[in-house]
Amino acid sequence: MNNLSCRISYKGFSAMQHENVFKVFQGFLEEIKPSNILEIGTAEGGFIYGIRDILNTINLSNCNIRTFDIYPNEKRSSLSAYNIEIYTENVFDDDYNLINPELIVPFIQRDGTTIVFCDGGNKAKEFNCLAKYLKNNDIIMAHDYIDTRENYLNNFEGKIWSAHEIGEPDIANCCEENNLLPFWQESFQNIVWACRQKRIK
């Protein structure tokens, strides 16, 4: 893969991810042992398919996965055969409030640790909307994250990654208000993901 293409393939399914994404997530998921994963922004589904396979190999085949995208994709629909719930609908209104909270909130608040992936059309607003529904020790993540614009321009653009859709200023207030602390961030910074864990004081 050319990192600057922002695209890899997983079992024939496209994933707009860094080439090392599954190496990092392997260790992360082994440590966290999530019970539920919610994804905003399925695209073709290569990323969440890879996550499903990692979970299966570490004896977490019972982890629930639910993913949403607003655009239809016939190929993506086939992933439902792999124990992935696929939804094609917009869950946010124009102000990024939840349209159908019954599809999102009870799922996040199921027993066990939930991980939320924000990888849709506006990662910052998705993050800020969904963070308030996390339980203690749940995790929320956002893709195309580099902490500052300066860091992106100096160290990522033209070298590692070609998109900077969310940074620390976009989520700092939300993290403070919801007691979200950096978690595995050094590892995830290298594959352009933000990772924050809910820790009740």
Image (cartoon, rainbow, N blue to C red):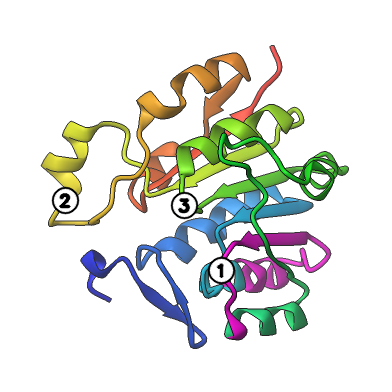
Q: Which residue is mark 2?
A: 157
Q: Is residue 117 above or below residue 170?
A: below
Picture coordinates of residue 167, whole percent (x, y): 35, 34
Give the amino acid type for the residue marked by disc 3 in the picture.
Gly
Sequence-wise, which precedes: disc 3 or disc 2? Answer: 3
Give the amino acid type for the residue marked by disc 2 in the picture.
Glu
Q: Are marks 2 and 1 in contact (CB under 8 Å)?
A: no
Residue at horizontal 31 percent and vertical 65 percent from the top: 6
**Is residue 64 one of those drawn in magenta?**
yes
| The C terminus: image quadrant | top right
Q: Are marks 3 and 2 in contact (CB under 8 Å)?
A: no
Q: Which residue is mark 3?
A: 121
Residue at horizontal 64 percent and vertical 55 percent from the top: 90
In the rendered image, which quarter is residue 111 located in? Answer: top right
Check disc 2: other Cα within 10 Å, few if <14, some if 14-19, many if 20+. Answer: some
Choose between 195 and 66: the one closer to the eye: 66
Give the amino acid type for the residue marked by disc 1 in the picture.
Tyr
Q: Is residue 200 above or below residue 145?
A: above
Picture coordinates of residue 15, whole percent (x, y): 45, 71
In the rendered image, which quarter is residue 130 located in? Answer: top right
Q: CA distance from mark 1 to mark 3?
A: 11 Å
Determine whether, in the image, residue 145 is placed left or right of residue 196: left
- Whether residue 123 is visible here, answered yes or no, is yes
Q: Is residue 103 above or below residue 200?
A: below
Over which residues does the magenta segment extend? 50-74
Q: Which residue is mark 1?
A: 71
Say how many tags the image has: 3
